[in-house]
Amino acid sequence: MYILQERIRQEGLILSDTVLKVDTFINHQVDTALVVAIGEQLADYFRQEQITKVITIEASGIQFAMATAIALQTPFIYAKKKKSIIQDETAYRAPVYSFTKQENYEVSISRNLLDATDRVLVVDDFLATGAALIGIVDIIAQSGAHLVGVGCAIEKSFQAGRQLLEEKGVRVHSLARIKQMSPGHIEFL
Ligand code: 5GP
């Protein structure tokens, strides 16, 4: 997606060979027109799949899941990361290790929101190590729902996420695929 790549080139801050900061248009301030365009592209790519729900993880995937779900005219679900006192104890759960935060956490989705009749598209801001999305794939498998694929705005293709998902038979589509980067330099696939 040309406009996303150009925006990353212009405003992305490459902090190291592995960390890209996009806080002026995606992760802190959000460019709503760009997010709507990303949602439409992801929806168009998977439109033939009769999707019933879009799933993401709080918090940074929410705007992309919402834009995609609006374009597909479906609801979206954001998996929760923290335990809440009002949470359903029977919820589907999966452990995740966050490489960016270097901590373990659990993702969960209430059991009543997902079942074997659902056809699900997973959407997120970044595909990096894939750890977070593999947690979601695990939850979808527990529910018996059919996973149609994973759509991401930005993929760091030099990290293992895509390969891990594809090894599980998951179809992956990302709109800006970074081949390699270092401070002051970025190359897209
Ligand atoms: P994972 O490593 O599990 O694929 O990435 C989990 C989450 O970490 C992503 O959804 C994203 O929110 C965040 N993340 C991973 N790599 C980066 C990065 O280079 N920049 C930013 N801003 N977030 C990242």
Image (tube, grey):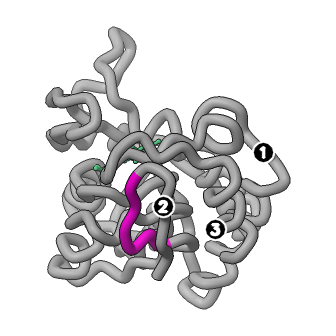
Viewed as shown, does residue 71 lie left or right of 158? Answer: right
The boundaries of the magenta stretch are 177-182
Residues under numbered marks 2 and 1 in contact, where contact means CB atoms less than 8 Å apart:
no
Foreground: 71 or 179?
A: 179
User: Where's residue 189, x and y in %?
Assistant: 46, 82
Q: Which residue is mark 3?
A: 5
- Which residue corresponds to the image point at 24% horizontal and 56% vertical from the top-left? 129
Q: Earlier in the sequence, mark 2 or mark 3?
A: 3
Q: Earlier in the sequence, mark 2 or mark 1?
A: 1
Mark seen at residue 99: none
Q: Is residue 186 above or below residue 169?
A: above
**Amino acid type of the residue tagged 3 in the rendering:** Gln
Mark number displayed over residue 185: 2
- Residue hosting label 1: 31
Q: Is residue 70 magenta?
A: no
Three-letter amino acid code of the residue under disc 1: Asp
